Amino acid sequence: MVLNIHALLTQRTNVYEDIGTNMTKHLDEALAEYSRSDCYPFHMPGHKRQRLGDGDVRPEEIDITEIDGFDNLHHAEGILKEGQDRLAALFGANESFYLVNGSTAGILAAICGCMTRGGRLLTGRNCHKAVYHAAYLMEAGLEYLYPESAVLRTEGSAEPEPAGIGIQGSSEPESTGAGIQGNAEAELTEPGIRGSSESEPAEFVVQGSIDPEQVRRKLRAFPDIQAVVITSPTYDGIVSDIEVIAAIVHAHGIPFIVDAAHGAHFGFSDNFPKKAIALGADLSVESLHKTLPSYTQTAVLHMKRAAGEGSYRFDPDRVKRYLGIFQTSSPSYILMAGIDRCVRILEDDVRKYRQPEQRQNSLFGAFEDRLERFYRQCGEFQRVKVFPYSLKSAPDMGENDWKRNPGADISSVRSVRFCLGENDQMRNPGADEENNDPEQPVGIFGRDYSKILITASAVGLNGQQLYDLLLRNHHLQMEMAAGSYVIALTTIMDTEEGFCRLCRALREIDCGTAESGSATPRHSVYQALPEIDCGIAAGREIMRDELSPDRVNRLQPVFAGLYRPQTKSAEIACAMDAVKSVIPLSESVNRITGEFVYLYPPGIPILVPGERITQETLELLETCRARGMQLQGMADLSAETIRVVR
C-alpha cells in the first residue's frame, strides 16, 4: 500500500490550523489553549512543559521585587549570592552569575569586558548574532574562524531486525525515578508495516567543528587579537576541541570565550562531553532553558581563573560592570528561582547517577537509555535517516548488548552505518588537511547526541516539509528545520511517550514511500502531489519541483556553503552607522549590506554589515526565502528589500 501523503496532510485538523489566526486572541488565552493540545515539544525550553516542584504555587504568588531578605542581583550578598555560589560549585567555575536576559546578556558582557574599544576579535563565523552585536558596540574589527563543512553519508543498511525489538520493551512506561514518566501506548515495533528491505543512503550536510590549526594560524597572522570566541556545541550539536584550542589561545596570553548555550547539560553524566569551563575556557555562557529544566530566558555566565596562577586572564570587574549594563535592573525572581531549582534538581540527580544501583532511575540515566533505544530503532528505517548516534566505529554488537551498557557505541550496529568517501568532505579554504584521524570523520571533532537530526530527503522531503509534516499530522513540534533535515531537541525531561511518538511518526513516513511488490516508481507518490498549503502559519506551499529528490540533492551544496567566506569592505560599526539606501534584494549584487541577514533559528549571520553581496549569496538567500525559511535581520520583514551602504 502506498502512503497517501496528500490525504495525511489534509485529513487531520488540530490547534495548528488556527495558528496565524491567534491575533484575535490574547496571548495568555492562546497559550492556555495550546497547553491543552496533544502537541509534543521536541524543542526548548528544556523542562518540556512538565511541572517541577510545587505545582500548586501560582507565578503571581512568588513574583516579587528586591524586598527585605531576598537580596539584590546587582549587589548580591545574601540568598542570591549563596545560590550563585552553589551554581559555580556544581558547574566547576570560580564564579558564576545568574542571567535573566538569556545567554545574549552573558555573551555581550563577556566580549565587551575582554576588549578595548576598536580592538580586534577572533570569532567563529557561525557564532550567534549576540557576538556580532558586541562587536558593533565595541567598534571591533572582526577576523573569522570558519567551521569545517562535513558531508556525512549513511550507507544503505542491511536487512532490518525482526519485529519485536522496539524502542520500548513493554507497554508500561518507564519511570525516571523522579515522578516524571511518559504514557507509552505500546511497543514501537509493529509487524507488517515495514518498507522495502533495500535501504537508501542519505546525506547530512552540517557545519562542522572549528579546526584548532586555523585558530593558531589566525593568531599568528593577527597578533593584536584581544580575545577569541567560538560556539561549542553548535545548534546541530557539533563540538570543537575546546582543550586544544584553549591551549593555543592561552599561549598568546588572551582570554578564550565559549558560547556553550546549547551545552548546559554537559558534564553531568558519562555520555556527554565535558563542560567548556572544565577544558580551559576562561568564560563560558550556558542557556539553562535550552537543555535543562529551567524557564525560558534563564542562563548563566561562568568565569574560571588560569590554572596554577590564581588570577583571571581578563579583568573580572569589567565583565561584572557590563553585566550590570546588559541585565535588567528589575530581574525576575521567578526566573532566578527557576535557576536555583534547576541547580537543586541537578545536584540530587548527579548524586543518584553516580550510584550504580540508582543510575537507571536518575534523570540522566533514564535519558541516556531512551536515546540509545531511539537511535537503534531508527536504524531500522530504510529511507528516513537519523544522524549517527556516534561518530566513531565500534565492533558489531548483538541486539541486547546496547541496552544497559552506558558506554556502548551503537553507530555500527547493522542497521546504523555511515561512511565518508574521499570526496564527501567539503572543506573551507585554509582548512588543515594534515594529521587527520582516519577513525574520525574529517571536520567533526565530537557530537552531542541529544540533538537528533533527521532527514527524509530520500523520499523527496526537504527539511521544512518534514518539519511541517511532523507538526500537522503527528503533532510533533520540532526545534528547527534546516535545508535537508530537522532537529529534535531532547533533554532529561523528555518522556518515553515522546520518543515513542516520534519513532512511530518517522516509521510511518519511512514505510509509506514504497509499495511492496509494485512497479510504481519509488517517489511517485510525492511527485504527484498537488500544490497544497502545508505552511500552517506562514502559508508555505509544497511544490512539485521542491518534492523532487534530485532537487533536494542538488541543493545540498548550497546549504553546505551557508556560512562561506564573504568579502568584507567595511567593519560592522562603520556599515551599520553609514547612510543607507533601500533596494530590492534581487538587485543587490555587488552592493555592501548595511544590515544583518541570518536564518532564525539559529540566528547565525549569512551576511554581516560591511560585506559585499555576491550573486552566489543572493541565490542562496532566494532559495531560503522560496522554501519559507525564516530570513531575519532585515528591516523588511518580507525579505524582499535590503538596506545597502550608499
Image (cartoon, rainbow, N blue to C red):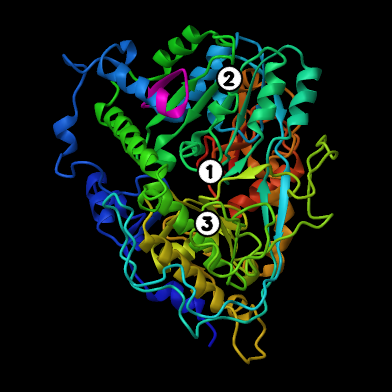
- The residue that label 3 is drawn on is 405
Query: At 34% across and 70% down in the image, what residue appears?
Result: 13
Question: Gap in Å between the C-alphas at discs 2 and 3?
Answer: 49 Å
Mark 1 touches mark 2? (CB < 8 Å): no
> From what the image shows, is residue 101 above or below residue 110?
below
Camera-side residue of 533 and 365: 365
Residue of label 1: 272
Tell me the SS state at disc 1: loop
The tag earlier along the polypeptide, 2 or 3, is 2
Q: Position of residue 327 (x, y in %)?
A: 38, 20
Mark 1 against mark 2, which lies toward the viewer? 1
What is the secondary structure assignment of the residue under circle 2?
Answer: helix
- Magenta stretch encompasses residue 90: yes
The answer to whether residue 275 shows anywhere in this view is yes
Amino acid found under the numbered disc labelled 2: Tyr
Helix, strand or loop for disc 3: loop
State how far apart marks 1 and 3 are (Cα). 15 Å
N-terminal of the two: label 1 or label 2?
2
- The residue that appears at 72% across and 22% down in the rendered structure is 248
In the rendered structure, which segment of residues is drawn in magenta?
Answer: 88-100
Decide: few, some or many residues near mark 3? Use Cα within 10 Å; few <14, some 14-19, many ≥20: few
Residue 209 highlighted magenta (yes or no): no
Label at residue 361:
none
Q: Is residue 329 visible?
A: no
Which residue corresponds to mark 2?
136
Q: Earlier in the sequence, mark 1 or mark 3?
A: 1
- Front-most of 405 and 73? 405
Task: Return the residue nearer the eye: 178 or 503.
Answer: 178
Q: Which marked residue is nearer to the observer: mark 1 or mark 3?
A: 3
